Image: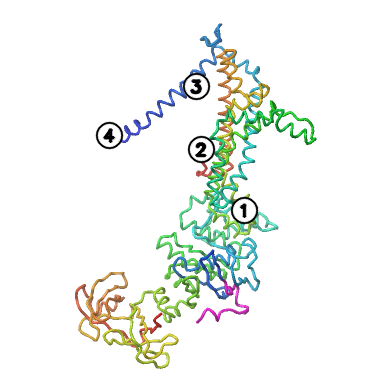
């Protein structure tokens, strides 16, 4: 059997899967986005740009997504970097595995159940009650953007920790010795050596979290209480409630385009930041 | 020459280890090291892996703090001074170049850490000079991964010397280079050291490298210093079998000392064969000892003699030929014959018989320890 044929055969299942589950649905969505809503809901063939012209009606969903997805990514980064640094560099190696497992433990429970827990924690009988008992006013947390931010940060944190951990763990400790040898105090070595060399991990983590957050729907639905909704929630609404498939398709296409643009820009930026190194892989 | 005699506060010393001991848990990596390093010298720590040579170097750099004893740099005790405040630079074993910086950025790293930071034009000029010095002019904008192993080594060297350190520490800097390149680099390093006048301290397990480059060599074993001396001293007057074996090749024959007169001893080996030569300290008549005889000091000839041998193997080495010969009393030993000597005597094939001899005084009579 020729190498070429063997390669094709081995790749066939993946190719078939991607064609059927990714390419085909994308084409269908793109086609639908130019159609019209049938009288009883669903799709009826047509060619109109009206769905795209009406995107502004769902501006709130786009605004929430485009603000909370980057904000959530940033929050994850701020919390995950020191944690990953501690796990990779500082902690006694005999505790390392245990602590790494603790980072993944939340994944053993469904995000749905964990979000319910947050509803109670952020709801009237939870943290706000504690705050008011202590005499710091009477805050409302649940169903605010802040609640959604907490929820998404909590949910996606491990996805940020691991790539950063890996890049820090791989970092050649002799580079830090070299930096010290050349007269750099530890904190400056961190800024000049550790931080730039962990860019691949930071880039991967941010990408992973950001892309998933852009499509998030469960956490805003539960912690946003219909007040703070993402594009994902708008899509559920359009496809399942009002059954306006073409308009839903247009919203979906808009989301995909926004993601493509931001991700491409982001990749350009990180590559430049990393100084064109070819060892910086983003995934 | 003992390790103990080398401490003192004389002005010619740039660095000193005084009773420096380093323990890692139960492991003693460096054992009571006393060493005074002369200003401007090229000193090597030579020994097998795990002998403590790297630990000694890392104590000078500040990466390890001695468990006991003191480290002095230019008359100042530096035990508690962190690496980034020591006027010492190191060329790391695998160079440890910063992969995210260009060649020029790597080289000027040390200058950019100075406070106040030198002006950019000065830094640039210094980088260009350093690149010239290591014969890499114009390579500044290159990326580290675009450089070959030999070039990376030069970059590491430039990155260290640009800071004009009081000590330049070299940790097996040539281990990753192929033989030819290593030889070129050895010559280059030596030339550079003379030109810059910086004190170089080299750690190596390669005796040839240490012999060819150093003013003094410090032979180490099990964390301690065995002998310090010039390459010639170590080669001609090794203190014991370990040094004789580590510095150059040697044959060792056991026997009994039959007479000692002055510094010369006569030792009789198996079959009553006589070895006469310089006796190490404490050799006395009647004791058992070891005679060390360098392969190049034995001559092989056709025809019969006092020590008949059979050629077991022959290796052609270019300028020299190495013979492994067998004598019924002495067993097998090595002979290094120069091309010139062979031209006179004709070479012997494996299986042929001949005889060997060496001049009186060629052997070294060592303590059997």
Q: Judge by depth and name the residue closer to the eye, B64 or B275.
A: B64
Where B351 sits versus A61, above or below?
A: below
Q: Chain of mark 3?
A: A
User: Looking at the picture, how far across and down is residue B308, in whole percent?
Assistant: 23, 82
The single residue placed furthest to the bottom in the displayed view is: B261
Where B357 sits versus B116, above or below?
A: below
Q: Judge by depth and name the residue closer to the eye, B191 or B93.
A: B93
Q: Which residue corresponds to mark 3?
A: A26
The answer to the question of whether label 4 and label 2 lie on touching residues, with beta carbons closer than 8 A, is no
Q: CA distance from mark 2 to mark 3?
A: 22 Å
Q: Which residues are magenta?
A: B1-20
Q: Tell me the element at label 1.
A: helix
Mark nearer the N terminus (2 vs 3): 3
Q: Chain of mark 1?
A: A
Q: Chain of mark 2?
A: A
The answer to the question of whether label 2 and label 3 lie on touching residues, with beta carbons closer than 8 A, is no
User: Looking at the picture, how far across and down is residue A105, in whole percent?
Assistant: 55, 38
Q: CA distance from mark 4 to mark 2?
A: 33 Å
Question: Which of the labelled discs sits on residue A1, or is there none?
Answer: 4
Q: Residues within 10 Å of mark 4 (few under 14, many from 20)?
A: few
Q: CA distance from mark 1 to mark 3?
A: 47 Å
Q: Residues within 10 Å of mark 1 (few under 14, many from 20)?
A: many
Q: Judge by depth and name the residue closer to the eye, B146 or A55.
A: A55
A224 vs B158, left or right, is right
Q: Which residue corresponds to mark 1?
A: A189
Q: Tell me the element at label 3.
A: helix
Question: Which of the labelled discs sits on residue A283, or is there none?
Answer: 2
Q: CA distance from mark 1 to mark 4?
A: 54 Å
Mark nearer the N terminus (2 vs 1): 1
User: Looking at the picture, how far across and down is residue A186, in whole percent?
Assistant: 63, 55
Q: Residues within 10 Å of mark 3 (few under 14, many from 20)?
A: some
Q: Residues within 10 Å of mark 2 (few under 14, many from 20)?
A: few
């Amino acid at each position: 059997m020729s190498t070429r044929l063997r390669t094709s055969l081995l790749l066939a299942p993946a190719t078939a899967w991607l064609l059927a589950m990714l390419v085909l649905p994308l084409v269908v969505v793109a086609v639908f986005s130019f159609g019209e809503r049938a009288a009883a809901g669903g799709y009826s063939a047509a060619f109109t740009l009206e769905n795209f012209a009406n995107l502004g009606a769902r501006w709130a969903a786009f605004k929430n997504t485009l603000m909370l997805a980057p904000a959530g990514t940033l929050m994850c980064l701020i919390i995950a970097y020191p944690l990953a640094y501690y796990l990779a560099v500082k902690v006694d190696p005999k505790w390392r595995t245990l602590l790494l497992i603790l980072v993944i433990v939340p994944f053993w429970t469904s995000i749905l159940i964990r979000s319910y827990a947050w509803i109670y924690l952020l709801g009237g009988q939870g943290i706000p009650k504690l705050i008011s008992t202590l005499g710091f006013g009477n805050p409302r947390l649940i169903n605010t953007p802040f609640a959604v931010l907490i929820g998404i940060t909590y949910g996606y944190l491990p996805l940020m920790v691991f790539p950063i951990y890996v890049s820090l763990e791989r970092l050649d400790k002799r580079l830090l010795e070299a930096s010290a040898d050349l007269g750099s105090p530890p904190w400056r070595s961190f800024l000049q050596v550790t931080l730039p060399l962990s860019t691949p991990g930071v880039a991967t983590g941010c990408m992973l979290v950001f892309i998933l957050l852009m499509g998030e729907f469960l956490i805003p639905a539960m912690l946003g209480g219909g007040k703070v909704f993402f594009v994902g929630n708008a899509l559920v609404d359009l496809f399942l409630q009002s059954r306006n498939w073409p308009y839903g398709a247009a919203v979906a296409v808009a989301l995909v385009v926004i993601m493509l643009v931001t991700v491409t820009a982001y990749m350009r930026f990180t590559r430049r930041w990393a100084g064109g190194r070819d060892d910086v892989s983003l995934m | 020459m003992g390790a103990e005699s080398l401490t003192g506060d004389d002005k010619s010393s740039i660095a000193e280890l005084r009773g420096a001991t380093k323990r890692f848990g139960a492991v003693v990596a460096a054992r009571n090291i006393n060493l005074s390093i002369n200003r401007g010298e090229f000193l090597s720590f030579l020994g097998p892996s795990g002998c403590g040579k790297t630990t000694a170097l890392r104590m000078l750099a500040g990466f390890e703090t001695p468990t006991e004893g003191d480290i002095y740099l230019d008359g100042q005790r530096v035990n508690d001074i962190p690496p980034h405040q020591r006027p010492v630079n190191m060329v790391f074993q695998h160079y440890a170049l910063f992969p995210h910086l260009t060649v020029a950025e790597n080289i000027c790293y040390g200058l950019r850490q100075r406070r106040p930071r030198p002006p950019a034009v000065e830094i640039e000029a210094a980088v260009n000079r350093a690149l010239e010095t290591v014969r890499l002019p114009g390579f500044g904008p290159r990326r580290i991964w675009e450089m070959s192993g030999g070039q990376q080594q030069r970059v590491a060297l430039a990155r260290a010397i640009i800071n004009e350190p009081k000590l330049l520490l070299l940790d097996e800097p040539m281990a990753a280079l192929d033989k030819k390149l290593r030889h070129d680099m050895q010559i280059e390093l030596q030339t550079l050291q003379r030109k810059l006048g910086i004190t170089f301290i080299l750690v190596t397990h390669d005796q040839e490298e240490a012999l060819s480059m150093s003013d003094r060599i410090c032979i180490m074993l099990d964390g301690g210093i065995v002998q310090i001396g010039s390459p010639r001293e170590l080669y001609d007057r090794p203190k014991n079998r370990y040094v004789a074996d580590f510095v150059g090749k040697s044959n060792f024959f056991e026997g009994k000392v039959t007479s000692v007169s002055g510094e010369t001893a006569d030792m009789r080996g198996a079959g009553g064969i006589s070895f006469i030569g310089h006796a190490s300290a404490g050799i006395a008549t009647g004791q058992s000892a070891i005679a060390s005889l360098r392969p190049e000091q034995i001559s092989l000839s056709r025809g019969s003699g006092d020590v008949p041998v059979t050629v077991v193997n022959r290796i052609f080495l270019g300028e020299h030929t190495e013979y492994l010969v067998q004598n019924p009393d002495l067993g097998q030993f090595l002979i290094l014959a120069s091309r010139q000597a062979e031209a006179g005597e004709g070479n012997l094939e494996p299986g042929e018989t001949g005889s060997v001899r060496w001049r009186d005084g060629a052997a070294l009579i060592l303590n059997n320890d």
